[in-house]
Image: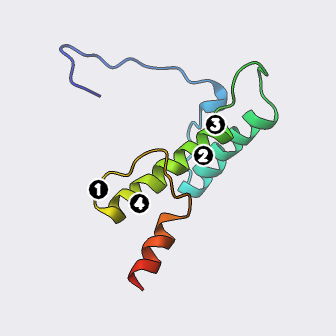
């Protein structure tokens, strides 16, 4: 949150689906809940006209950004997008130092 003059927090009501009231979940359990929501939005959408929470395209773009961060670190400079070399940057890095 950026500082705003006289900012006041506002209570936000979550839908029952998004509420995990009174539960203390482990990281694994939280991940399972979130992954189940993503899968359900793909397989059984509440509104078929709306896009899923996270599509395959979103996943591919996220993975490319992660690979781009590793590639940038490996090169010691910015990595251009889209990545030209689609092989795994950590495997390339490992083979260059072994």
Q: What's the mark number on residue 54? A: 3
Q: Mark 4 points at which residue?
A: 70
Q: Distance between the residues labelled 4 and 1?
A: 11 Å
Frontmost of labels 1 and 2 is 1
Q: What's the mark number on residue 77? A: 1
Q: Distance between the residues labelled 1 and 2?
A: 22 Å
Q: Where is residue 49 in the image (x, y as percent from the top left)?
A: 76, 18
Front position in the image: 60 or 19: 60
Q: Return the disc, 4 or 1, that comes first in the chain's sequence.
A: 4
Q: Return the disc, 3 or 2, that comes first in the chain's sequence.
A: 3
User: Residue at point 38% right, 81% down?
Assistant: 97
**SS state under label 1:** loop
**SS state under label 3:** loop
Q: Where is residue 77 in the image (x, y as percent from the top left)?
A: 29, 56
Q: Distance between the residues labelled 3 and 2?
A: 10 Å
> Callout 3 environment at 10 Å: few (<14), some (14 to 19), or many (20+)?
some
Q: Return the disc, 2 or 4, that comes first in the chain's sequence.
A: 2
Q: Return the disc, 1 or 3, that comes first in the chain's sequence.
A: 3
Label 2 close to label 4 by CB (< 8 Å): no
Frontmost of labels 3 and 2 is 2
Q: Mark 2 points at which residue?
A: 60
**SS state under label 4:** helix
Q: Is residue 96 above or below residue 84?
A: below
**SS state under label 2:** helix
User: Residue at point 42% right, 86% down?
Assistant: 98
Front position in the image: 35 or 49: 49
Q: How far apart are marks 1 and 3 (CA)?
A: 30 Å
Q: How far apart are marks 3 and 4 (CA)?
A: 23 Å
Frontmost of labels 1 and 3 is 1
């Amino acid at each position: 949150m950026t500082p705003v003059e006289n900012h006041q927090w506002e209570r936000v009501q979550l839908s029952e689906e998004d509420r995990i009231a009174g539960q203390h979940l482990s990281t694994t359990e939280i991940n399972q809940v979130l992954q189940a929501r993503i899968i359900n939005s793909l397989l059984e959408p509440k509104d078929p006209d709306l896009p899923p929470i996270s599509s395959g395209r979103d996943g591919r773009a996220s993975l490319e950004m992660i690979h781009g961060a590793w590639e940038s670190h490996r090169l010691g400079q910015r990595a251009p997008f889209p990545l030209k070399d689609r092989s795994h940057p950590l495997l390339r890095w490992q083979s260059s130092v072994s």
